[in-house]
Amino acid sequence: VNDFVAEFVGTNTLKCKIIGRKNGFTLLEAGKNVKLYSKDQGTPGKEVMVAIRPEHILISSEPIFDHTPNAFCGLITETKVQGGFVWLTLNIDGLSFKAILTNNAYELLKLKEKTKVFIAVKSRDVRIVS
């Protein structure tokens, strides 16, 4: 998969730098304050493209920092309803991510634009693609 295809099908892509290995994970720097852990292997110092599928981004109105290293606080900057789903554009420390929820989940969480949310991504869902 290349980054054009990933973006075309709606996958989030980020340019990252591999900054090391920690406890069996590859540690990536996506922005000044955004570090991601991936199960994929990588060479420290290398610039890579990372893909995260929108449906793999977990959204909560409460902190979810307990057991995942990829947990962040963000802001919903845009919402778009498509059928039974709501697409969210999230801002995490200046980086833009797309996530998707069912209409029911969106309503249950009482989300809307400009809402602060807590976001988590499992390390196995942070994929190094180049």
Image: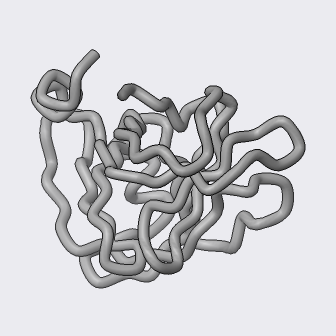
Number of marks in the image? 0
Residue 23, position as x, y percentages in the image: 89, 44
Specify whether residue 122 is in view: no
Residue furthest out toward the right: 23
Q: Quadrant of the N terminus?
A: top left
Residue 119, position as x, y percentages in the image: 54, 61
Q: In which quarter of the image is the C terminus?
A: top left
Specify whether residue 116 is in view: yes
Q: How is the image coloured?
A: one colour
Q: Is residue 107 above or below residue 37?
A: below
| Residue in front for this viewpoint, 100 or 126 | 126
Q: In this view, does 19 lie above or below 48?
A: below
| Residue in front for this viewpoint, 106 or 47 | 47
- In the image, what residue occupies the spot 18% across and 68% down? 78
Residue 56, position as x, y percentages in the image: 49, 36
- Asked which quadrant contains residue 49, the reply is top left
- Asked which quadrant contains residue 24, the reply is top right
Q: Is residue 93 above or below residue 16?
A: below
- In the image, what residue occupies the spot 15% across and 48% down? 81
- In the image, what residue occupies the spot 25% across and 61% down? 89
Residue furthest out toward the front: 45
Residue 105, position as x, y percentages in the image: 46, 49
Compared across the picture, whether 73 is left or right of 89 comes to right
- In the image, what residue occupies the spot 38% across and 34% down? 53
Compared across the picture, whether 33 is left or right of 103 comes to right
Residue furthest out toward the top: 1
| Residue in front for this viewpoint, 96 or 19 | 19
